[in-house]
Image (tube, rainbow, N blue to C red):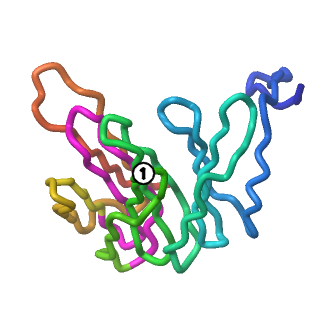
Amino acid sequence: MVRGDSGDGGAAMVSVINTVDTSHEDMIHDAQMDYYGTRLATCSSDRSVKIFDVRNGGQILIADLRGHEGPVWQVAWAHPMYGNILASCSYDRKVIIWKEENGTWEKTYEYTGHDSSVNSVCWAPHDYGLILACGSSDGAISLLSYTGDGQWEVKKISNAHTVSLGLWSSRVPGATKGIVASKNLTR
């Protein structure tokens, strides 16, 4: 058991279920479980993305993905109805979409349309299609939409934000489009 601050002045008890030795060579910035909770993706300042099989309390390195030229800030799993797809974003201004085919992970798409670090990636709810929102320090948000046959359509919204805060809305009854929200925060 680990003791921590519960936020209400009392101590919170948290159980450690498992630990994973990622063998990253620098700071880890994000870790995300897949839809089924059987795979863990991590990313680091060492410019790598790693994928582990963590079933039954184990840890087996499935892939060590290299393609970024700077610290990798975030990873995001697509819904499994699209296959095993993972997005990563980096200080190098790139968004990379990785896909597993026949047990091998490959770079399937690379987006380089931002002028500064890409700090956040988030997949739309699966019923909107395979759409990825990307937030960058250049103030823009990009929407990458898969159109089929390996093609991606890009819509870039310049000056969309000054602080990285973006989200997909839940499906609103009667709505036909997803909503991407961006809000400027001032202190």
Q: Which picture quadrant has residue 124?
A: top left
What is the x, y in percent for residue 161? 34, 60
Q: Is residue 171 above or below residue 101?
A: above
Relative placement, left or right, of 124 versus 87 is left
Establish if 60 lies above or below 171: below
- Look at 58% across and 61% down and name the residue there: 49
* Residue 145 on the magenta segment: no
Helix, strand or loop at mark 1: loop
* 95 and 84: which is toward the camera: 84
Residue 57: x %, y % from top left: 75, 32
Identify the magenta region.
116-140
In screen coordinates, is 34 left or right of 40?
Answer: left
How many residues crowd mark 1 within 10 Å: few (<14), some (14–19), many (20+)? few
Q: Picture coordinates of residue 30 (x, y %)?
A: 61, 52
Name the residue located 46 percent from the left edge and 49 percent from the top edge: 76
Q: Is residue 167 above or below residue 126?
A: below
Residue that label 1 marks: 102
Say what amino acid the circle numbered 1 marks.
Asn
| Image coordinates for residue 2, horizontal then vertical, percent | 88, 30
Q: Residue furthest front?
A: 102
